[in-house]
Structure formats: structure tokens, C-alpha cells
Amino acid sequence: MVPRVRFAPSPTGFLHVGGARTALFNWLYARHTGGVLVLRIEDTDRERSTETHTQVILDGLGWLGISCDEGPFFQGAYGDRHRDDAERLLKEGKAYRCFCTREELDSQRARAEAGGQAFRYDGRCARLTADEVAGRTAAGEPSTIRFRVPDEELAWDDAVHGRITFQGRDLDDFVILRSDDTAIYNMAVVSDDIAMDITHVIRGDDHISNTPKQIALYRALGRPLPVFAHVPMILGTDGKKLSKRHGATAVGDYQEQGILPLAMRNFLALLGWSPGGDREIVPEDEMIRLFTLEGIQKKAAVFDPAKLEWMNGEYISALPAEELLEPVRRRLGQLGVGHEGRDLRPIIDAVKSRSRTILEMAERVAVRLDPSRSTPDAKGEALIKKMGAAFGANLRLVVQALGALSPDGWQAEPILGTLKALAEARGLKLGDVMQPVRVALTGSTVSEPVNELLAVVGRPRSLARLEEMAAPSHGESGAA
RNA sequence: GGCGCUAUCGUCUAGGGGACUAGGACGGGGCCCUCUCAAGGCCCAAACACGGGUUCGAAUCCCGUUAGCGCUACCA
């Protein structure tokens, strides 16, 4: 039998990194085993579910390269089956009608809590006679259906945690069908997982305490249990549950920040799962080959943006410029930087190994497209100030020397030869020639080798910018 | 409060009774390379929560303690 797994998000918010990772683990498991991944949108909370959120979730999964084999199915479409299952349990005496109102329950709960006691449903409606139930129903009194939790051991061998055991007596009889005839989460999930032949339930470990209830429902419905695998939560840097306070938590945020989907997926996979050994950058086929539920960590993991950025940088460096073209173009568009008729690839090659995000890379590309848009940063200003008159003077020497190069000769190698010869002839340290050029062209004291920078920027723009920056206002008179 | 889950460097982790002087990666620090940075190379600081067992031997198995987290709804 092929494994059938599912990812079942509620469209009540954006695709959270925790949800994305749960989806990823399901996907990896399906691909590893040759199984099927079903996508089920749990939209039964009409109040909070929106179509926009559904679309965002679908987009996020697509962006990460997580492909589903079946669905999306919408849980809201299966209300009749949920109700039928609940009523079947009622008919078989495994559940009962409860006429307690929400108000009564709430006040009982409040009273219990005020007294420092745990609230337990007292099961009063479980003791109603058939006549009483018929009478109150006929009188139009609203009621829910409550599941009679059996007093027995509710245990399973969790694929990541091992044996987990609950006792039925510790659980309240819980509502499975609301007074408006819609199913409560645990009922809907079990009904759907059964109907969809789900064999492995891989989900967040905040569902561990729902599992005994669901197991009881499976038993009552006479169906075999799936394998449960509860994956740990993802925490913020402060060790608290990841939330808005931690900044970016939705996968869309990372897309915005210039993170590549492959890097995001690699990073997420290694958060709570390890292929064993010392592997960090794991290509897709390897990831699929090595993935096992047993390799999943039991402990919650802290989401470390610094490591994500490092990994993203690794992916950027390894990718050919060709594949970086699209994201960079998109970002340049956002920045309002035109690049018609320019070949971006050599520029991307020049900056990619020094960039950790697409955003960083696009900004550097923009400056190389048009150096006049650069402004000296703090270190750049410091260099200008420190060199004083020599800054402009050396730039003028450079302009003079490089001006002798023909447009055809404007290549990295001849440029380097020219600059070295200049330094030697004038008795200057190479750095005193190179650094002013670097600052003039990029505003920064950090870049690819200066000769490559000049080659990438091109002859006319380079010479124009160097002359501009050689003007007295940038040199001897100090910063403006 | 009850029930449950978890516990190795700051962070992600390797580790399944002896190969542990506890390994790798991110981040931090230093050196080399060098026109700067990145990369690369070399090096440094940094952890088995605590207490009891079991065993010839425990990071690893058991029990407690502590701490963190989750659930305890006519939410999902």
C-alpha cells in the first residue's frame, strides 16, 4: 500500500514557516516513499478563513517547490459526511446529545477556575433518558453531540517521539458536532483522514494532545489508526513561539527579503531534521533519499535568520548568473533602476559571491550599472578624509592612465597592468591607487577586485565617475 | 491545577553503552592569502540542565528534580 500523507493548513493567516516546514516534511516523506501528498484546506472556521489566505498558502508551497499530488480539497465541502459520522456515533450510543448551553458551560468553567480547580465537564447530559432527550429536542431546544470518551488507554507509537500514552479518564467528553450541525476540528479531521485514506499523519507537535481524542474516534468508527508523527515547533530567537514580534514569520516575507526558495527549503529541512553526519547544503535528490521520520528531532528548534542568510549566500554563489537574472531583474524593477540593453550577467557574476540576499545583490548591480548613484558610506567617507588631497590627485592619475586604454582594451587584465604600472611609476602603494577608485565607483571600501569592477562598469561610466569624484569638493576640502 | 511533550556549545545539530580529549555548521575571535571584502586555508573560545541509580564502563538506559513548551473551547 502506498503511503498517503496530507498537509492540512487552515486559511486563517499567511503560510507560516512552521506550517511550511510541516508541509515540507510531508512532501519529503511522500517523495521518499513514493507515496501521495494530499493538500486539504481546513476552512471550517468560516469567520477567519479567507480566499486570499488560501491563495497565499498555495503560492507559498509553489514557491518552495512543494508539489501536491491531490487537492486542494476544501474541508468545508464535506460537512455532510462529518455530520453523518457524528450522528452515526450518536446512534451507536458512542456519543450523546448535550443540551448544556455555552453560557452554562462558561460560567461553570469560570467558577472552577476562580476556585483554582480544573474545569471538567460533569457529564450531566450523558445521563439523560431517551424520553428526556426526545422531549427537549421536540421542544426545539438546541443541542450539540458530545463524544463519550471511553475509560481506556489511548496510546500510540509516535514515529518521532516513540510511545505516547494517555488515559481516557483524563479526557473530558468533548463536543464533536455543534448545535448548528457543523463538526468540531477533531471530528472533521478524523472523518476526512479516514475518507482520504491517510496512512501517515505528520503534523506539528502542538497536536499531541488532540491525538488521543482522535484515536478514540478512529476506534469508535471502527477504523485502523494511521501512523502519527509529531514534528517539533519552531521558536523565535528568544526561545518563545515564533510570532509577529520576531519580524518575518511568513514565507512570503522571506521571498520579499531576497531569499531563494531552494535556500529556504534547505534551511527549513535542517530545522528539526538531520540527514546524519555533517551535511549542511543538501540538494533535493539527496534530501529525498535521506529523509526519514526517525531523523526528526524531538526538541523545538530556534529559527536563526543569520544561518538562513549564510545558506542563501551559499546558494547565490553556486548558482550561474543566468538563473539569478529573473529575481535580480524583478528587484531592479522595484528599485526603479532601468537596465535596457545591458547584459546583467557579468555584473551578477562580479557581485554574487559577496551577496547574501537578492536584495543586496540587486543594489550592487544597480551601482555598477550606474556608479553615479552611489554615495560614500561611513568607511568610504573615512577614507576620503584620511587621504585628503591624495584622494582626488590619485583619481586624476588613474583617469589619465586608464584614458589611454582603447575601448577594446578595457578588460580586467590590461586594466590591472595599467594600474600596477601607474603605482610603480609614481611610487604609490597599490592600495592608494585602488581604494579611491573603489570608493569613487561604489561608495564602499568593499568590492570585487578593482580592475574587475572597472571592467564591469565599463569605460565611459567609469571615467566619468572617477573625474566627478576627483573634483576638489570630494578631496582636499573634505566632506561636504 | 490536570494531562502530555522536551532537555548536547549563544543557535542548528552529530551521537543509539566503550572508537568522546564530545564532532560539524552558523555566529564570534585570531592568523594566512591580498588593492578591499567575500571565498578559501589554518587556529581559538564555547555544550552533555541537576541529582540519584543500573553497569566493569553512561551524553547514550531507568527514576526523580528543575526549567521550557503544548493542550485543557459549540477555535483550528
Image (tube, grey):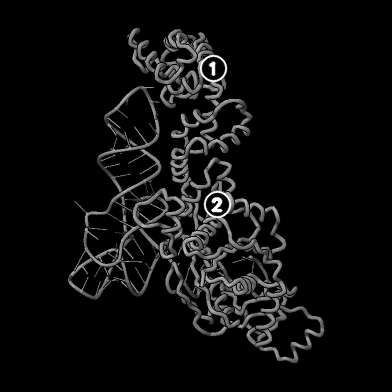
Q: Amino acid at mark 2?
A: Gly
Q: Which residue is mark 1?
A: A461
Q: Which residue is mark 2?
A: A65
Q: Nearer the viewer, residue A88 or A141?
A: A88
Do circles 1 and 2 both sit on a common chain? Answer: yes
How many numbered badges does the structure rendering display? 2
| Chain holding disc 1 | A
Q: Position of residue A145 (x, y in %)?
A: 69, 79
Q: Amino acid at mark 1?
A: Arg
Considering only vertical position in the picture, is A442 above or below A420? below
Kindly give the residue lying farthest to the front in the view shown: A408
Provide the secondary structure element on which disc 2 rests: loop
Q: Position of residue A170 (x, y in %)?
A: 53, 79
| Chain holding disc 2 | A
Residue A38 falls left or right of residue B46: right
Residue at (39, 19) in percent of width and height: A413
Disc 1 crowd, CA 10 A, few/some/many (<14, 14-19, 20+): some
Q: Position of residue A212 (x, y in %)?
A: 53, 76
Kindly give the residue lying farthest to the right in the view shown: A139
Residue A31 falls left or right of residue A434: right
Residue at (44, 17) in percent of width and height: A436
